[in-house]
Image (cartoon, rainbow, N blue to C red):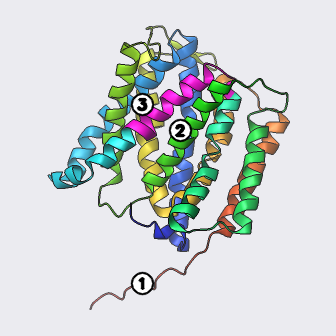
Amino acid sequence: MATLTHDTTLPPSRVASGTGFALAAAGSFALSGPLAKGLITAGWTPGAAVTARVLVAAAVLVIPALVTLRGRWHLVRRNAGLIIAYGLIAVAGCQLAYFNAVDRMQVGIALLIEFTCPVAVIGWMWLRHGQRPGRLTVVGALAAVAGLVLVLDLLSGAELDGIGVVWALGSMVCAAFYWVISADEDNGLPGLVLAAGGLLLGGVVLLAAGLVGVIPLAATRADVVLRGTAFPWWLTVLVLGSVTAGLAYVLGIAGTRRLGSRLAAFVGLSEAVAGVVFAWLLLAETPRSVQLIGGALILVGVVVVRLGEPQVEDPPPVPSTP
């Protein structure tokens, strides 16, 4: 993989647009929790919900991806390994590892372990590209992780399962891979094509895993109730796939390519905060004060990490030719 130079020098305009894309992606990803919970309450298994989500996302993105390619199939052939790795690791691998983790341990603990992926990204960029984190980056990372503990409300104590921890660490590695691979824009592959190809392959793998019994697949046609309002199951699945996966992955790649994997991974932690907000709005799950404090800590951590990232001035505008 080419050196990700924009992880070390970040023009302010690139940071602004990248942060906007990354925050929008985090919000889109976070919406999946309440929608999936509504489906699960209606009788769907978690595996069925996430498999439908990924397959619908792939179906929504395939035609726009083909239009974006405009016949440049050499880009797909040249990056076939990248697309396969993205689908197997960043999409299917992350989901399968997370499902196996929560099957053995509390959801909050599994999420906390997975969401420590920015620390893994820092380590990778240091070891692979020599980008040693500065003091502010380390302080911001500690603040963000502390905020996660509060947002996920883990202070009451939790039991750990050794195999579950291994699966959760696997999901963390897959998530870190997502951030690193999404930041590489030197391959010439449009982000939309990478997302579509990865989601299509990942969806097929998840479906196959369900058919052989690795993850349980069961679904119903019962209405999904959100905040006392009933919605058709197909509408919920359509939004779950098109918005919380299709749109989210495309925005995530766009934001990461502008911010670099290290900063984008920390901005992505805002997904935990957005998840609490959506649970309040759609499921009437009122956040506790400790979760609000945790959300503030995450945001402070992201800002501190940003301050610790070197930046360069935007290049002057090129004068127009008369």
Which is in the foreground here, disc 1 or disc 3?
A: 3
Q: Is residue 66 something that shows in the picture?
A: yes
Kindly report the secondary structure that dominates the magenta region of the rendered protein: helix
* Precedes in sequence: disc 1 or disc 3: 3
Instruction: Find residue 158 and report its image quarter.
Output: top right
Relative to 202, 16 lies left or right:
right
Residue 163 location in percent, x, y? 62, 25
Separation (CA) of disc 2 from disc 1: 35 Å
* Precedes in sequence: disc 2 or disc 1: 2
Q: Which mark is residue 301?
A: none
Q: Which type of secondary structure does the marked residue at label 1 adopt?
A: loop
Number of marks in the rendered image? 3
Residue 266 location in percent, x, y? 62, 53
Residue 196 location in percent, x, y? 32, 41
Instruction: Find residue 221 and report its image quarter.
Output: top left
Q: Is residue 278 magenta?
A: no
Q: Which residue is mark 2?
A: 29
Q: Which residue is mark 3?
A: 241
